[in-house]
Image (cartoon, rainbow, N blue to C red):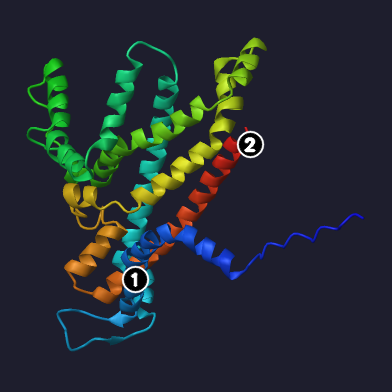
Amino acid sequence: MATIAPPAPRARTGSGVDRLEKWRRRAPLLPALVFLVVVTQIPFVVTLVISTLHWNVLQPGDKGFVGLDNYQTVFTDERLRNAVKNTIVLTASVVLISLLLGLLLAVLLDRRFPGRGLARTLLIAPFLVMPVAAALLWKHAIYNPDYGLLNGTLNAIWRAFGAAEGPQLDWVSDYPMPAVVAALVWQWTPFMMLILLAGLQAQPGDVLEAARVDGASGLGIFRYITLPHLRQYIELSVLLGSIYIVQTFDAIFTITQGGPGTATTTLPYEIYLTMFRKYEYGEAAAAGVVVVIGTIIVATFALRVISSLFREEMAK
């Protein structure tokens, strides 16, 4: 007579043993999570609290809760509005010019030629220079009206045409915003170039070869195949570049110190002035919160673009 085997015991899904196993796997990540919360979230919460206070260290007895008044000041104060405008102009200019130059250099480096490795290394070098060192280089070695490279080159050109001496331009004082933009473009173009070069090298070779066989010109291939392929890489370059450049402080502080007047005072530099020159801690904290929220919004779009790129690569 055949015996019927008893049914196998079911796995206790969601039981205490399973939960213990899940926590055992997550345990190595807990120190990193605690560290992240301590160094980022707690200071941000403290900043939120300070942003609701009227707090000037020059008036220690006059500190109190003002609600959202500091945020109202951020959006209505003339200096802060001017700082926001300068931040937008600086960020848009640097991102667009760096993107165009980076695309041009990426297209050139995507071709094979003798010394391509050396050229790639030299073009990446500006991005590896410390921001303060790069700003000092541009301020003294390039922009200085007495011994800078720009005026020296102009004087040499003038003397070549028979003139005694060319004009001694003070680039930082006469053209403050273009001076800062040029320095940042020099530093951030390699960043754009690397992202776009990765996109160019990820193109499917069979599609390009089929287009050449069909008689498509180089310009047509670039316009109808390469550019659509690079769309997400361009979006990623713009988003990441905007996140980093909108926080620019080193170049402003080193080259122009926000001047002349408020011509190059950006929002991060205005926050610095509000905190360490006016000693308005509550107002500076509110402006900082606004910057963080704006950066988070841009970063969210950047993460979506990165996720879509990963999904495309996995689907190939």
Q: Identify residue for label 2.
A: 315
The residue carrying pointer 2 sits among few (fewer than 14), some (14 to 19) or many (20 or more) residues within 10 Å by Cα, namely few
| Quarter of the view holding residue 33 | bottom left
The picture places residue 60, in percent across and down from the top left corner, at 16, 85
As drawn, the label of residue 245 is none
Q: Identify residue for label 1.
A: 42
Q: Amino acid at mark 1?
A: Ile
**At 40% from the left edge and 48% from the top edge, which residue is drawn?**
242
**At 20% from the left edge and 54% from the top edge, which residue is drawn?**
259
Distance, label 2 to label 1, CA atoms, is 39 Å
**At 55% from the left edge and 16% from the top edge, which residue is drawn?**
218
- Left or right, residue 114 beside residue 302: left
Quadrant containing the N terminus in the rendered view? bottom right
Q: Nearer the viewer, residue 132 or 165?
A: 132
Of the residues under marks 2 and 1, which one precedes in the sequence? 1
- Left or right, residue 227 beside residue 5: left
